[in-house]
Amino acid sequence: MPRVDEESTAVTDEPTSEAPAQEAPKEVKPKKPPRRPAEKVYPVISEKIMRGADAMTVDQAKEYLGWKQVEKSTPKCSPAIKAVSGLDVILEKCHKQRWLDDARWLRTLRQDHLNRKFPYNGKTVILGDYGAVLDGMYRMASLICAEHERTNGLLAKYWQKLSPEPLRLETILVCGLDEDDDMFATFNAVLSGTPADTIFRSDVFQTGPYSKCDPTERKALSKIAEYAVRTLWDRTGGKMNAWAPDLNVLEAIEFLRKHPSVRDCCYQIWTEDGKGASKDDGGGAVSNWLSRGYAAGLCYLFGVSKSDPAKYLGGTTRSEKLLDTSLMDKAFEFWVYMGSQSTDAKPLRDALNDLILPNDDRANREQVAAVLCKAWNFYRDDKEFTRKDIFPRFVNVEKDEEGNVINRRMDETCTVGGVDLGSNPKEEEKEDDKANDEADDKVKDKAKTPAEKGEPKKGTSAKDDVIEQLATLRKKHPGQLMIFKTTTGVYAAWEDDADTLVRQLGVKMNRHPSGLDRCFFPSTELEANLAKLVSYGNEVTVFDTDYQTAIRQAKPGDSQTEVPKEGKDDRGGKPKKGGKKGKKKEDTLKGGIG
C-alpha cells in the first residue's frame, strides 16, 4: 500500500523504511547594499552658501564624494574619471547617485572650471542625512579633475598662469535630506535645457533687426544657430583649440556674439526654406538636402571664403573682425539660386538628385556639402559649370545585378577656401591635386604594418612589442612627447602622444589593428606642428626611422634643436655603416611601431 509522507503530503511507492535525508539547498543571500553610518551624519536640514573665501575646495569635494584613489582599477572605479584624468577612483559616498560614467559631460565641466567659466549660479550640492551625495556629483568630480589638470596636466603651465590659485566651486551646500528614492526622483523632474534654449533666452535674436521676431520665430532661429555653430566649430578646426576642444553652451554663445553675421545666415536659410512651411506649401528647398543649421554654417563659410586663414586660425581669439565678409551678400544669393527652378540651376539640381541611391530616401550630408561647395567655387567667380564639374569623386562603387549603384564611398572632401578646413581638418586630401592624391595613397600603403597587410605575425604580438618599445623610450626620455619619422615620409605618434596630437593639432586618430591609438601627419607639416606643440608647453623629441635615435628636440623657450643628423651616430662621428647595398630599412621594429 502506498505510503503518505506527512510533511510533504506526497504519495510514494517506496518501502516504509525511512529514506536517507537529502541536503537542503543553500539559501542565496541577497546582496547587501553599501553600509551607511549607524547614526545620521546630518540629523538636521541645513543650508550654507559657499562663495568667495568660503567656496568649496578640492579637499572638501573629495570628502563629500568619498574620493578614494586606488593603485589598481576595479569595477567600482569610475570609468569617466579614468577616461578624463587617468585616475582609478572609487566614490564611496555616491552609492545613492547615478553611475559616474559620462566622460564627455565630465570633460565639458572640467573645461568650464579650467577656463574660469563656472560662475556662481545658485545651483545646490545636496548631501543626504547619512552623508550620501544626492546631487552635485559631476560638478564636484569635475572640480577635482580640473585641479588635477591644472597642477599635473600637459598644459599645467598655461592653466596655472590663468588660475594661479587652486580652483574652487561656488555653490550652495544643502545637508540632511532623506536619501530615499522618492526624494532623488524629484531632483531630475525638470526639463533639461539645450544650447538652443540658452540662445533663445539670450540677446542673440532679440536685438537689431531681429528685435521684432516673435517667440516662435526666435525658437526656430535659435535651433538653427545651435547647429550652425557646431558646423563652423567642426569645419574651422575648433577641436584643435587645446584650451576649449569641446563646444559647450558658453562657447556657443560666445562664438555667436563674436561672429554676428552667423545670425544673418540663419535667417537667410530659414527664409529660403519657407520659414517652417511644409513641402506642399513651398517649404523644404534647403532642408530636403541639408539640415537648416548645417546649411547656415556653410552659408557663413561661403561668405567669408576670401579670408586669410593664417590670420584667423592662427590666433588664440577668433572673431569676425579677423574675417573678410565681402562675399556675404553673394552667399545669400547662392542659396536663392539653389532653391530656384531656373534653367541656370539645373546642373546643381541634377548633381544633387544623382547623389540619392535607389535604396535611400535622401542623399548623404557630406556628399551634398561637397556638391554645394564645388558649385559655390564656380558661382563665386561667376563661372558656368556642368553637373560633371561639381559631382564628387567616388571609389569602392558597388552595383546590384541590374547595374544600379547601391553603395559607394566619397574619395574627397571639398572646401571653399578661406577658413574652411573641411569636415575632418588636416586629414583630408586636396581634391584638385591628383599627384598629391596618388602620392598620399602610396604613403599610406607603405606605412601599413604587417598586421594591416594581412601578413601573419611571428613571435610576440605587435601590441606587446609597441608597448615594450614605448616604455623603453619613455625611460630614456621622461616627460617628452615622442614623434617618430618613417621611411615613407610621414610622422607618427602612439597612444598618449597620439591623443595629444589629436587634441592640439586636430589630426585624425588612426587606430592600429592591435587596438593601440596611432596618428600620422605629413613631413611638410613638421615645422608648423612642432611650433604649435611647443606653444602649448610640450617638450618634443623626434626620432629617426630606426625608432631609437633622437634627431630633433624642441621645448618652450628654446629654438628647435637639431641633434645627431640622419646617417650619423649619437656622437656626431662618421656615418654608420649600412647593410647590403640596395637593402631598404623597414618601417617597423619587431613588427611593432610603424
Image (cartoon, rainbow, N blue to C red):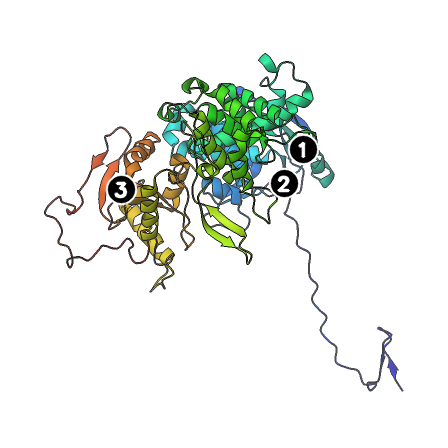
Q: Nearer the viewer, residue 192 or 4?
A: 192
Q: Which of the two residues, 379 or 431, is positioned nearer the viewer here?
A: 379
| Residue furthest left as drawn | 574
Per the rendering, the mark at residue 542 is: 3
Q: Residue 398: which numbered mark, if any?
A: none
Q: Position of residue 34 (x, y in %)?
A: 63, 47
Q: Amino acid at mark 1?
A: Lys
Side of 30 where 411 appears, left or right = left
Q: Quadrant of residue 192?
A: top right
Tell me the residue at 44%/25% (across/down).
380
Q: Amino acid at mark 2?
A: Gln
Residue 325's spot in the image, x, y percent? Answer: 45, 19
Q: Residues within 10 Å of mark 1 (few under 14, many from 20)?
A: few
Residue 279 marker: 1
Q: Determine the CA span between mark 1 and mark 2.
A: 46 Å
Judge by depth and name the residue closer to the eye, 72 or 356: 356
Q: Is residue 8 above or below residue 103?
A: below
Res 432 seen here: yes
Give the image location of residue 573, x and y in percent.
10, 45
Residue hosting label 2: 97
Question: Residue 3 sits in which quadrant?
Answer: bottom right
Q: CA distance from mark 3 to mark 1?
A: 57 Å
Query: Sequence order check: which comes first, mark 1 or mark 2?
Result: 2
Nearer the observer, 454 or 347: 347
Mark 3 or mark 2, which has the lower sequence index? 2
Q: Name the spot of residue 147 as percent of width and height, x first.
A: 46, 32
Category of crowding for the residue at label 3, using alpha-carbon neighbours closer than 10 angstroms: few (below 14), some (14–19), many (at least 20) = many
User: Helix, strand, or loop for circle 3?
Assistant: strand
Label 3 amino acid? Val
Q: Quadrant of the N terminus?
A: bottom right
